[in-house]
């Protein structure tokens, strides 16, 4: 009986350990290219927090310098403190407060910002190059994007790429 109880406790510990993984459960991005050449980005991000990497909030790293202007940041429906900085040629958006530790479990972030649309003008048409999810230190379960173009814009050719980093 003791062996059975010990085996059960080991199995339970392994199961709980496997469940305790920080990850992005869902990352939804709405890109709205505006007629003036700017882009409005609305991100909806669900993350599982276990206090391993995500302790006080999230860090969004953009792999290119941008003229990003943050409109709003919310965590779990309430306004959240954030800071924008540049480091090593990257733009960073830190969301959270240094003195506040997050509770473990699922947290929802809504981030809205504007920037000049990263469009390359080519003879055959324009090309939008934008790293939608940016760079993260943990896995994604699901990521999707909605792209809205100005009235009269036509998509003649579409291509998307996904890069997996293990």
Image: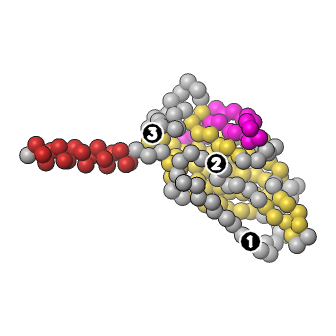
Whichever of labels 3 and 2 marks the residue nearer the N terminus, that label is 3
Q: Nearer the viewer, residue 80 or 140?
A: 140
**Is any part of residue 74 visible from this angle?**
yes
As helix, strand or loop, the secondary structure at mark 2 comes to: loop
Mark 2 = which residue?
135
Residue occupying image coordinates x 44% and y 46%: 21
Point out residue 12 in the picture as x, y percentages from the top left corner.
26, 46
Packing grade of label 1 (10 A; few <14, some 14-19, many >=20) is: few
As helix, strand or loop, the secondary structure at mark 1 comes to: loop
Label pair 3/2, CB-CB below 8 angstroms:
no
Whichever of labels 3 and 1 marks the residue nearer the N terminus, that label is 3
Label pair 1/2, CB-CB below 8 angstroms:
no
Residue occupying image coordinates x 8% and y 46%: 1
Point out residue 137 in the picture as x, y percentages from the top left corner.
56, 45
Magenta stretch: give its range.
74-95
Point out residue 96 in the picture as x, y percentages from the top left corner.
60, 33
Mark 3 = which residue?
50
Establish if 80 lies above or below 146: above
Is most of the magenta stretch helix, strand or loop? strand
Residue occupying image coordinates x 29% and y 44%: 13
The quarter of the displayed image where residue 29 is located:
bottom right
**Is any part of residue 106 visible from this angle?**
no
């Amino acid at each position: 009986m003791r062996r059975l109880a010990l085996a059960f406790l080991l199995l339970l510990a392994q199961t709980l350990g496997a469940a305790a993984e920080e990850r992005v459960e869902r990352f939804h991005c709405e890109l709205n290219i505006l007629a003036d050449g700017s882009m409005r980005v609305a991100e909806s991000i669900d993350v599982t927090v276990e206090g391993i990497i995500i302790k006080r909030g999230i860090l969004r790293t953009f792999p290119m310098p941008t003229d990003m202007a943050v409109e709003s940041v919310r965590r779990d429906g309430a306004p959240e403190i954030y800071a924008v900085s540049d480091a090593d040629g990257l733009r960073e958006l830190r969301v959270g407060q240094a003195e506040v530790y997050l509770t473990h479990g699922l947290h929802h972030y809504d981030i809205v910002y504007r920037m000049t649309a990263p469009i390359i003008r080519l003879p055959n048409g324009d090309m939008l190059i934008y790293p939608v999810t940016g760079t993260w230190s943990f896995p994604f379960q699901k990521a999707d994007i909605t792209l809205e173009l100005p009235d009269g814009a036509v998509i003649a050719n579409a291509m998307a790429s996904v890069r997996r980093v293990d």
